[in-house]
Image (cartoon, rainbow, N blue to C red):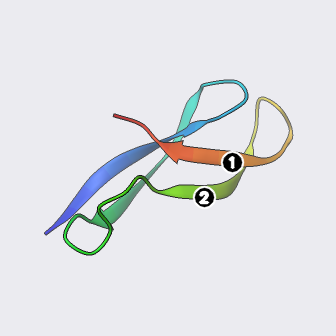
Amino acid sequence: MREIITLECTTCKNRTYSTTKNKRKTTDRLVLNKYCKYDRKHTEHKEAK
């Protein structure tokens, strides 16, 4: 039941990461702290539609 999702940077809005998540256990949107190569720093990345 895992689905592939894309992560979008909250500051520059670029979609740079993809990951999987379990839709049954995690129903809300995923938020991770990842490195953005365009901003050159760690920023929050949220699950995109």
> Label 1 near label 2: C-beta < 8 Å?
yes
Q: How many marks?
A: 2
Instruction: Give coordinates of residue 16: x percent, y percent.
Output: 56, 38
Instruction: Give coordinates of residue 40: x percent, y percent.
Output: 86, 38
**Most distant residue in the left direction:** 1
Relative horizontal placement of residue 46, taking residue 38 as reference (left or right): left
Relative horizontal placement of residue 13, taking residue 22 as reference (left or right): right
**Most distant residue in the right direction:** 40
Q: Mark 1: which secondary structure?
A: strand
Q: Residues within 10 Å of mark 1 (few under 14, many from 20)?
A: some
Relative horizontal placement of residue 28, taking residue 40 as reference (left or right): left
Pointer 2: what residue?
Answer: 32
Q: Earlier in the sequence, mark 2 or mark 1?
A: 2
The residue lying at 19 percent from left, 70 percent from top is 24
Instruction: Give coordinates of residue 18: x percent, y percent.
Output: 44, 49
The residue lying at 66 percent from left, 34 percent from top is 10
Establish if 41 lies above or below 15.
below
Mark number displayed over residue 44: 1
The residue lying at 55 percent from left, 55 percent from top is 31
The residue lying at 59 percent from left, 26 percent from top is 14
Instruction: Give coordinates of residue 32: x percent, y percent.
Output: 60, 58
Q: Amino acid at mark 2?
A: Leu
**Most distant residue in the front direction:** 28
Figure quadrant of the C terminus: top left
